[in-house]
Image: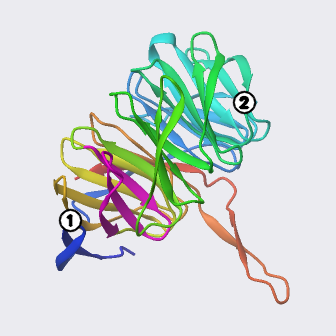
Amino acid sequence: MRRILAACLVLSGITGFCIAADAPGFKVAKKYPVPGDGGFDYIVFDGSMNRLYVSHGTEVNVLDADSGKVLGKVEDTPGVHGIAIVPSLHRGFTTNGGNATVTVFDTNTFQAITKISVSADPDFIFYDPKTGRIFVCHGAASKITAIDPEQATVIGEVDLGGAAEAAVIDGHGVGFVNLEKLSSVVSFDPLHLTAKQKWPIAGCKTPTGLALDTLNSRLFIGCRSKVLAIMDTNNGNVIATLPIGERVDAVAFDAENKLIFASNGEGTVSVIRQHSPDKYESVGDISTQPSAKTMAFDLKTKRLFLSAAEMEAIPAADGQKARMKRKPGSFTVLVVERQ
C-alpha cells in the first residue's frame, strides 16, 4: 500500500505549509528475476554498456539493463558489497567484506584479473573520473582507500576517525563522506588523501545514502532517523531536513528534473523536489517492495533500479521475536520508470 507523505515547502530549514501528495507519476514497470539466494547490497548501473552490476552473496550478477537478461557473473567475491566500473579500462572492482579484498575483473569476460588486499570492512566503492582513482569506504577501519585502477595497487588512505558509509567527489578537488555512527560528514582531499573538515549533520541520525548537487554545492544525506538532510558543502550548515521512509540506504539526484530520490527498505522511494538551493518539497513516495533499499539511477533514461527479495517469517521460539528471511528463488531487480 502506498504511504502518503505530507508535501512541505521548506525554506532555510523552516517548514512553510503542507499538503497531501502522491509520488509524481513513477511506478515499478518491470521486474528482472535473478538466480540464486544469497544476500544483497549495492546495485550499480553502467551507462557505457547499459548494464547492471548486482551484488549477490559471493558473486556479482551482470544484467542487460533493458531486458534483464543475465549476461554473466563475477565469482569468488565473498561478502560482496559494492561495484565500481572504469569504462576506459574495461575493468570493474568489487569490495569483498568477507576477506577484506577488492576484486579487479574484466568487464568483457567477467573474469577476475587480480585481488587487492585492503583494510577491514570494505563497503561502498566508486570511480572518480577527475582523479582517475577508485575510492573505497571502510566501516570498521574508519578509512577511505584510494586505488590506482590501471596498476591495481593501493595509492594511500584517508583516516577519518569514524566508520565511512558513502562518499562523493565534487569534481573540484573536494570529497565528502558521511560517518554513520558519528552522524557527521568529513570533507577530504581526494588527490593528497587528507581529511579537511568535520561537520555534524544537524537533525540526522545514522546517515547512509549520499548524493551531490555540484552546481549548487548541496549534499543530500539519507538518514535512518527517517529524514533527508540537505547540507551546504561550503560550510557544513544543514539547510533543511525533510521526511522520508524507514531504513534508507541510497540517495540519487536527478539534476535535470530537480528531483531527489531516497530508497527505503520499508518498500518505498521517497521523492523530494528542489525548487531552489534552499527550498525543497516532499512530493510523495513510489511504492516498491519491502527490502528494496539499495538503488541505482540511470541519468539518461531516468530509470531507477532496486535490488529486492520477498521476505518470510521464521517461526519464533518461546519468548523471542519472529525474524524474517529471504524467500528462496525470489531475488529480483525492480525497474522504476516515470509514466
Tell me, yes or no, whether the highlighted magenta stretch contains residue 83.
no
Q: x%, y% of residue 256?
A: 19, 41
Image height check: is 276 above or below 2? above
| Residue 118 image label | 2
Callout 2 amino acid: Val
Q: x%, y% of residue 310?
A: 59, 62
Q: At 69% from the left edge and 45% from the top edge, which residue is drawn?
A: 36
Tell me, yes or no, whether the highlighted magenta stretch contains residue 228.
yes
Q: Which residue is mark 1?
A: 12
In depth, the one of 115 and 157 nearer the eye is 157
Q: Secondary structure at mark 2?
A: loop
Q: x%, y% of residue 95?
A: 65, 34
Q: Nearer the viewer, mark 2 or mark 1?
A: 1
Q: Is residue 252 left or right of residue 135?
A: left
Local crowd at mark 1 within 10 Å, few (<14), some, or many (≥20)?
Answer: few
Q: Secondary structure at mark 1?
A: loop
In depth, the one of 291 and 227 nearer the eye is 227
Callout 1 amino acid: Ser
- Give the prevailing secondary structure in the magenta stretch: strand
Q: Quadrant of the rendered structure where residue 284 is?
A: bottom left
- Label pair 2/1, CB-CB below 8 angstroms: no
The colour style of the image is rainbow
Residue span colored magenta: 217-242
Earlier in the chain: of badge 2 and badge 1, it is 1
Q: Is residue 261 left or right of residue 11?
A: right
Q: Quadrant of the rendered structure where residue 9 is?
A: bottom left
Q: Is residue 291 left or right of residue 128?
A: right
Asked if residue 233 can be seen in this view, the reply is yes
